[in-house]
Amino acid sequence: MIDLDAARAVLRTNDLGGYTVPTRTLYPFQWNWDSAIIALGWHCFDEQRAWQEARTMFGGQWSNGLLPHILFHHESDSYFPGPDIWGAKSRVPSSSISQPPVWALAIARMLRRSAAAAAARDEVRALLPQLVDYHRWWYRDRDRHDSGLVDCYHPWESGMDNSPAWDEPLARVPGVEWEYQRRDLGHVDQAQRPTWQEYDRYLHLVEVQRKNKFDPSRLAAASPFRVIDIGIVSILSRATSELIALCRQFGLEEEAESFQAEIARTERAVGRCWSGEHRCFLSWDQISNEPLAEITTATLLPLFGRLANDKQAGQMASLIEEWLAANRFPLSSIHPESPRYDPECYWRGPVWLHINWMVADGLRAYGYSQLAERIKEGTRKCIEAAAGSGYFEYYSPETGQGCGGGDFSWPAAVALLWLNE
């Protein structure tokens, strides 16, 4: 059985007064898409605290609409790189990239499910202009050619940091030549984390951001890593659909029409990423102008984004059926037949519960409820199989062993918002 008291205790333990860290030592700050999912978890038992999570996150929004992927609300020596490396001159010290934009979906869901309807409407009314600005940032600054498919400038921005999909585009990025001390390896086994070579390249991309003064037109030309991440595209499209409904509900008709046009552009363009051979949508390298032919859970997220047609959804469902048969605990973050599959290394194989939730949601929307339920049951088994605290950062698809950080916030939140339904 899932221990929901333990899930609530994880969120309370990681609450630093207005924002929730993913876990106390490994990630001691506020992360963007973590925080959105965590807010949904809080909302299951403390609505006021859920809205406070959103207000704190949007308190660090940049004037151009960017919602950073990290807000450094306080100093900590247990994480690297900190705000001094990023060099952003923001009102709340922050990084200069974003993450998959889950917030509009989270806020819309919180509004629908709120027991305090009037208070929830007041919260949404206050946050809505900032949500609009955030989505405008994506479509304006990350789709410079109005292609309908936004760009990603850093593997960290995808949220799937060391995904094998990024191996080729990351290989052309030079590493930094200065010495630094990684803090993550003091908390997690090195075998479960990105390599030093990957970190050298991640830090070079941070330098590119800083040296180009975070200017979107300069970055579009200067960044040696520029990909269409099908995961971001899918989550953005789904969240924008939720934002459109919010805009109409609160009288922002002009904004709603503008975002409707953006979704239509994405729907027309996303076919470029479809691969009949792979039975899924692939990410795309914008510099080499080639698809990134690695099957990962991100390549399934067009189901969540409602971007697949019925035929494509059927082919993706057959792919997922085979995937489930190959995983004892679903879903491994890359296809288990990939030569790069590693069941305990971060985004190169482990199970991530919030991605399971998204994939299952997409399957259910296209009528594949039995497949969705199999993923849900497998997700429960991950938590039950994990020794000690069931709420780990990620899980082995072969043993169910919890990996990465322990007492982790977003698997606890997923248990509350999804597994308890």
Image (cartoon, rainbow, N blue to C red):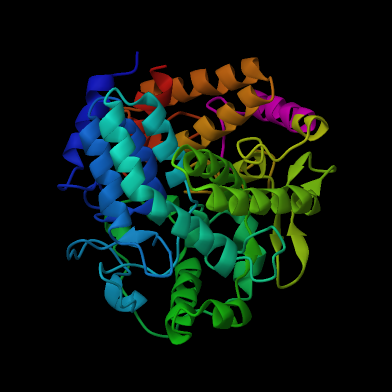
Return the x and y of residue 290 as percentages of the image width and height. Answer: 78, 64
Image quadrant where residue 283 sits: bottom right
The image shows residue 290, relative to residue 303, as above or below, that is below
The image shows residue 65, relative to residue 407, as above or below, that is below
Q: Quadrant of the C terminus?
A: top left
Residue 226 is left or right of residue 17, and the answer is: right
Identified at 47% across, 37% down, the residue is 249
Return the x and y of residue 63 as percentages of the image width and height. Answer: 37, 69
The residue lying toward the viewer, choosing from 199 and 250, is: 250
The residue lying toward the viewer, choosing from 132 and 55, is: 132
Q: Say whether residue 356 is visible.
A: yes
Magenta span: helix, strand or loop, mainly?
helix
Identified at 45% across, 59% down, the residue is 133
How many numbered discs?
0
Q: Quadrant of the N terminus?
A: top left
Q: Say whether residue 348 is visible.
A: no
Return the x and y of residue 350 as percentages of the image width and height. Answer: 50, 40
The residue lying toward the viewer, choosing from 1 and 312, is: 312
The span picked out in magenta is 314-333
Image quadrant where residue 410 sits: top left
Residue 279 is left or right of residue 220, and the answer is: right
367 in the magenta segment: no
Identified at 74% across, 38% down, the residue is 308
Return the x and y of residue 327 as percentages of the image width and height. Answer: 60, 28
- The residue most toward the left is 17
